[in-house]
Image (cartoon, helix red, strand yellow):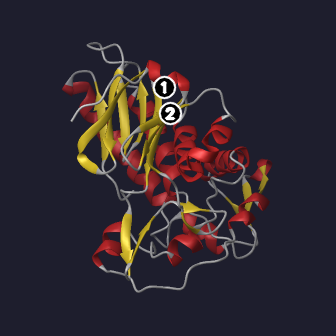
């Protein structure tokens, strides 16, 4: 998934060694299924089938149903049908390749087909999916969260306390014996070596989205991967990162992105769609902004 995945569990090496092997194999299988960077992946096959009904795997069908519901819930701020805009901004290969080859400047993108995702259709009985013609989707972020949660639940078959962190998409089961909660460091988006906040979280999901992690040069312009589907361009936001606590990883991942795109002006409206999330934003000057109840989990900063 072009990111570091960390597996954590409490228990004996005898039990956990095969558990880690099985979980790693599951993650690799899912990555090969959902990646847009392999022509043989199920996602790439689905994109090529746009305009016709596609018989999806159970995993793909479930993830797309979740994506469609969350896209509607966020009024389109989360919208996977931004692959064309990502490629136009220069994110047309795996991130290490994009960064190694400073892409040529292109004309600003003024249109996007992201709204076509609202026309996605499903046939439950046959697990068939219909993408509108010319529509291509990227499931990168939500797929990471989906995989992290299911990988953690797989690991939980061997232990009562475990976690899977897929590049900022974290899902935990149980709580560590020593602390009674998961102590989560929130990285300073301006300085990856510095922790800007510490959270104590119960079991569940935590996801962070940032405009400073996946960025690259396109000619003289610096671009980032967070596309605002309303304009088809990297989002212009007054925040650098948003962390969301939620009961499920897909929800945390989607709302971290939606709130980051929305910024301070619209965050309250976006977050108001749910009463089961808490969020913490880092402003460009390094100060923190968040939901009222996040203060119950937030307990300080460290240099």
Mark 1 and mark 2: span between their CA atoms?
7 Å
> Where does label 2 land, which residue?
290
Instruction: Judge whether 81 appears above or below 180 on screen.
Output: below
Left or right of 253, for residue 166: left
Relative image position of residue 169 (x, y in whole percent) = 43, 42
Relative image position of residue 193 (x, y in whole percent) = 21, 46
- Residue found at x 69% / y 54%: 76
Helix, strand or loop at mark 1: helix
Helix, strand or loop at mark 2: strand
Instruction: Judge whether 101 appears above or below 262 on screen.
Output: below
The one nearer the camera, 76 or 251, is 76
Mark identifier at residue 294: 1
Mark identifier at residue 278: none
- Residue found at x 61% / y 27%: 276
Relative image position of residue 233 (x, y in whole percent) = 56, 69
Instruction: Judge whether 128 appears above or below 166 on screen.
Output: below
The one nearer the camera, 92 or 40, is 92
Give the total number of marks visible in the rendering: 2
Relative image position of residue 206 (x, y in whole percent) = 45, 35
Left or right of 274, for residue 189: left
Looking at this rendering, what residue extends furthest in the front direction? 285
- Residue found at x 21% / y 36%: 303
Image quadrant in which you'd find residue 6: top left
Instruction: Determine contact: label 1, label 2, CB under 8 Å.
Output: yes
How dense is the environment of label 2, judged by Cα within 10 Å: few (below 14), some, or many (20 and up)?
some
Quadrant location, the N terminus? bottom left
- Residue found at x 48% / y 32%: 205
Instruction: Judge whether 110 appears above or below 32 on screen.
Output: below
How dense is the environment of label 1, judged by Cα within 10 Å: few (below 14), some, or many (20 and up)?
some
Left or right of 19, for residue 149: right
């Amino acid at each position: 998934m072009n990111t570091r995945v960390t597996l954590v569990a409490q228990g004996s090496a005898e039990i956990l060694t095969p558990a880690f092997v099985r979980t790693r194999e599951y993650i690799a299988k899912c990555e090969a299924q959902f990646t847009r960077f392999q022509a043989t992946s199920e996602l790439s096959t689905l994109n090529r089938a746009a305009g016709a009904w596609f018989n999806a795997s159970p995993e793909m069908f479930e993830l797309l149903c979740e994506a469609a519901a969350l896209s509607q819930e966020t009024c389109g701020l989360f919208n996977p049908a931004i692959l064309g805009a990502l490629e136009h901004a220069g994110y047309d290969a795996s991130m290490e390749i994009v960064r190694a080859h400073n892409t040529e400047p292109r004309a600003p993108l003024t249109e996007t087909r992201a709204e076509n995702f609202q026309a996605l259709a499903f046939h439950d009985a046959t697990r068939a999916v219909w993408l509108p013609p010319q529509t291509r989707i990227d499931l990168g972020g939500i797929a990471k969260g989906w995989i992290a949660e299911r990988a953690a639940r797989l690991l939980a078959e061997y232990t009562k306390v475990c976690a899977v962190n897929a590049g900022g998409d974290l899902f935990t089961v149980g709580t560590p014996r020593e602390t009674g909660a998961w102590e989560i460091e929130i990285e300073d988006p301006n300085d990856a070596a510095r922790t800007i906040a510490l959270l104590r979280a119960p079991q569940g999901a935590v996801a962070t989205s940032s405009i400073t992690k996946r960025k690259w040069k396109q000619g003289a312009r610096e671009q980032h991967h967070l596309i605002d589907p309303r304009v088809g361009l990297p989002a212009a936001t007054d925040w650098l990162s948003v962390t969301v606590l939620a009961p499920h990883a897909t929800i945390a991942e989607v709302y971290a992105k939606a709130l980051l795109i929305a910024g301070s002006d619209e965050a309250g409206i976006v977050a108001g769609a749910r009463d089961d999330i808490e969020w913490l934003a880092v402003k460009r000057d390094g100060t923190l902004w968040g939901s009222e109840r996040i203060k119950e989990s937030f307990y300080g900063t460290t240099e």
